[in-house]
Amino acid sequence: MSSAVALPLTNPAGFSEVGYASTGFLVWGAALVFFMIPGLGLVYSGLSRGKNALTMVTVIMAAASVVTLQWILWGYSLAFSETGGVFIGNFAYIGFTSIGSQPLSTITTWVPAIAFGVYQMQFAAITPAIIFGSAAERFSILPALIFTFIWATLIYDPIAYWTWAAKGWIHNMACISDAAAGTPCLNGGLDFAGGGPVHISSGFAGLAYALVLGKRKVTDEPHRPHNLNLVILGTSMLWFGWFGFNGGSAVAATSRAAMAATVTTVATAAAALSWALFDYTFTKKFSAIGFCSGAIAGLVGITPASGFVAPWAAIIIGAVTSIICNLACRLKNRLGYDDALDAFGLHGIGGFVGNILTGIFAQKWIALLDGTVILGGWVEGNWIQVAYQFAGSGAIAAYAFVGTYIICIILNFIPGLKLRVEDHHEEHGIDVTQMGEVAYDHYDETIPETKEAVV
């Protein structure tokens, strides 16, 4: 006897779900991913100097709000419409038209499209917010929010489509011509929860944004975190929310979702300890920043692999991603770019490494936990999967970097949209000069003239 329960008569014929478990699971997953957004804001706020602390957490939430509206208008349609080509969707679902209890027939046949839409909305919302970690302490707020709207449309939505849509070219790398003809084979790059669309794209975009802005000004005040407790709290919120980020990407309440959540926390634990212990060999100190940086690197690295790898592989993925990201973050001073809060070093590099390791360690039996069939990774003899992962990751990195650089250059030429603040704004802090508010009263008292005069 089937345990499927027919949904109410308002639903299209033929759509049923095993209870309502998966719909509730996905809505709860959306809430967990949303919870990551203020978590990211607290990490960036704590890592910044106190005079910029309020700006960082506010801009993260504001950017997420901008993308929420963009997602409803046309973002969801561009990223997940089912009648697009291999490179971009169309406007079939513009304004969330016809998004209700019916499923997406080629992507998520087991949950209502509205549940999938609000879940993916949170992915879209947090991604451009990551970029501002690279540009911290020197970006202008309103131009940054305009940039966010444009970037979500021109960069995030196409990359999400390439990776996850039924006809996306990365998703069908072995049969791009067939996908273009309307018969996708779904044999291509593997990315369970956003190593490419979320992390590679935002990390390489952050590098481009930082290069256009230039370095922060050298002052007598050192560039160091002002509140490590906020960093630890924010990292904990990210770790908590990532159970929904990766586990929810199963898009159903299945054993594969449970496995994805399991490998997520395993990889994160391995990565946090690896980074902290690696630093300890040089400093003989167990660093809170190092532990948190490692945890974030592990979360990023396991993201594309989470629905494809076993727990033993998660330990390797977490540790390897952590050490490589650690080394990448050390390079910024030697190479001369100012990735202020290591968005590129953690997300760009971490996402790239995680994608490659997915191609190595993916296993058929993990995907089969919910009935998905894959050819496995290199550990199961499918070496070509690593090539697919390299090709997809490289394309995303190049598109995000070049596209972001062009967007930034164009905005800088438009009157009133200069991306970088004036020197005296940077000196006094973006909180008081751009917002007229401060996180801590003593920063307000350091301004020699009135706020209005500074602004």
Image: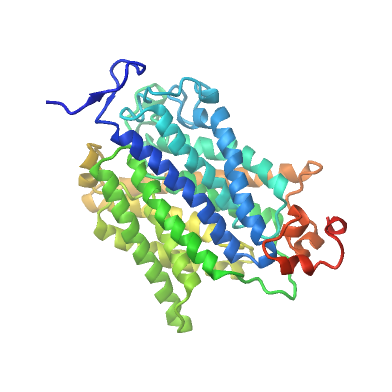
Left or right: 125 as drawn, with respect to 149: left
The picture quadrant where one finds residue 275 is bottom left
Quarter residue 148 falls in: top right
How far across and how far down the image is residue 247, in percent? 34, 46
Q: Which sits in the foreground, 149 or 1?
A: 1
Q: Can I make out residue 353 in this image? A: no
Q: Position of residue 93 (x, y in %)?
A: 50, 23
Q: If the image is split into quadrants, where does the N terminus sit?
A: top left
Q: Residue, x 78% and y 68% (percent of image)? A: 445
Q: Toward the viewer: 444 or 157?
A: 444
Coloring applied to the structure: rainbow
Residue 136 is left or right of residue 355, and the answer is: right
Residue 329 position, x and y percent, is 53, 66
Q: How many marks?
A: 0
Quarter occupied by the C terminus:
bottom right
Residue 294 visible in image: yes
Q: Is residue 82 above or below residue 247?
A: above
Residue 71 found in image quarter: top right
Residue placed farthest to the front in the image? 441
Residue sitting at 46 percent across and 64 percent down? 325
Residue found at the far left of this picture: 1
Q: Is residue 246 above or below residue 178?
A: below
The x and y percentages for residue 351 are: 45, 53
Q: Nearer the viewer, residue 63 or 172?
A: 63
